[in-house]
Image (cartoon, helix red, strand yellow):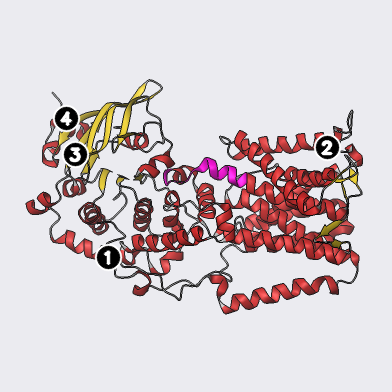
Amino acid sequence: MTIQESNTATLTGSESPRWRTPWHLMLYGIVAAVLMAAPHVMPDNYWLRIYTMTGLWIMLALGLNVVAGFAGLLDLSYVAFFGIGGYCFALLSSSQFDIHLPFLLVLPLAAIFTMGVGFALGSTSLRLKGDYLAIVTLAFAQIFKLLLLNLDTPINITGGVNGIYSFDPISIFGFRILSPVAYAYLIWFAALIVAIGAFRIKASRIGRGWEALREDELAAEATGVNTTWMKLMAFAGGAFVAGAAGALFASFQDSVFPNNFDFPQLVIVYCMVILGGLGNVTGVILGAVILSILPEFLREYGAYRMMSYGLILIVLMALRPQGIMGGIGFLSKKKQRPDKDKTGKLRASTDLYYAAKKDSRPSPAMQDKYHPGDQVMLKLEDLTQDFGGIKALDNFNLDLHEREILSIIGPNGAGKTTLFNLISGIYPPSAGRIFFEGRPITGLRPHKVVKAGIARTFQNLRLFNNMSVLDNARVGRFCRTGAGPLSTLLRLPRHNREERDTELKTRQILGLFGGRLTGYRFDQEAMFLSYANRRRLEIARALATEAKLLLLDEPSAGMNPQETLEITAFIKSLRDDHGYTILVIEHKLNVVRTISDRVIALDYGLRIAEGSYAEVACNEQVIEAYLGRKKR
């Protein structure tokens, strides 16, 4: 019986999307009215230009927020994508090469070409992180600037320092955009489209995948997220928005010059994103508005403008590192109180605790009822892992049967976690082969191993700490869903169906732990959970992947005796009630005794004992491995 079949959780009609509540609809209506009226109440064209440029800055900030905010990639080439879009528009809508394409063709061409460049840059820097990624992307931006300055001879492509100017007037369905007010409406309309897209992406599987990548790349990969593809999507998505903004900027300014796309512009956009809060769409929009208007009051100080940006960043990071909107619940759902109707009638972990407390040893009848099947689910052949001449695992063989709970024990350094890392694809084995349900999975990347049906937890907790409990579990559904960017942005049926399914199944799984992870904790960030609940959440995330085989690395570590009894009974129920096959590493021998069908003891990468718990616990080699050799 699957978890989904054993629960009756449903989503209530009261849980409507947050943007449909009357207060939010009224707020959006007020904002729309202000934006429509603003161009007509500006005191002069100077402030109208600032208003128009604010829309462009919002587009740029939201695009950078995709790369740096959602995905956590330190991209310093972003301003180059802005320039690529601007120069694409210039070359396709001017007399530079006597090409005069219509605006509705040039705009998407510029954005798509820039997206392609972003994809190419991302593909060449996939293995780079942090400072190294920053250096490579900064180098790309500087190379682009040098090309703009020097591609005026022998063939004049960019115009050098003189740039390109005098573009074709914009015409949209016969309506010519000539007045400053018309440009303001056009650019703010584009900014609105980008903002809607950002909100939709953030609340989707793609947004959750990016956030998981930002929080912990290894954990994201081991939960089924294809981190390589997500990085490429982030680079391409950010570049697409920057390219579109560049094309609109070139059209609005009627000229492009190399200094329009220099490093100071990058600093300004980063300030907007950091001021608003990395990954916070509403905050980034507000940050862009503030930093678009603030410089006008500092213009008379000239050289001190950039210093003011640096000062703002320093003060903000010291006082509010999460940004001005971080942690503000003004546009978020209220914290839910524990509510039985939200999760349905689900089995509580406290019930499991009392069942375990009554008798922690399975009866012979229960052992017969849940005897492991004959089919081999996981097969390891001569598995070896060599670290610089030290064999962490040496010619290890294993046949793990379906519905079997097999415990791996041994002292620290015995090779237990190395075994899990090999099975889950984190390390490629030095030698040997791995088969799952008869199919070879040796050397597969972790997300493909999860897709095949193997999920794991970690010895040292690897949760997505800044994501909610519900979103942590939702990430586990990533490998079982496939709605792409277009389906997500347009809210096509596939996206809607998958989101409903994800919501239902993750709530059901979290409900297996009773009130531990439900109610108001749905929206609680993982970092604020108790240690035991964080352990439970990591197991719930693994269950959400719909795996058949669970690798549990010290699931009871850090738990008190009562919590240990609970998790022990819960692990048994996963096999007994839901048919899971479980490979578990555990140091608490009472847990091993209670749950295990079979026990294997390791020491220095070698199997030193195998059999029932009673047989292994009495083995002299096992006793010596834990307690040391007796003096002769």
Q: In the image, what residue occupies the spot 61% across and 52% down?
A: 69
Q: CA distance from mark 1 to mark 2?
A: 64 Å
User: Which of marks 4 and 2 precedes in the sequence?
Assistant: 2
Magenta stretch: give its range: 222-235
Observer able to see residue 139: yes
In the rendered structure, find residue 348 and report the number of the disc placed on it: 1
Determine the image quadrant of residue 29: bottom right
Q: Position of residue 236 (x, y in %)?
A: 64, 45
**Which residue is under mark 4?**
621
Secondary structure category for the residue under label 2: helix
Three-letter amino acid code at the position of disc 3:
Val
The mark that comes first in sequence, 4 or 3, is 3
Dot 2 or dot 3, earlier in sequence? 2
Mark 2 vs mark 3, CA separation in Å: 67 Å
> Up-down: is 68 above or below 38?
above
In the image, taking residue 243 as reference, residue 561 lies left or right, namely: left
Residue sticking out furthest to the front: 174
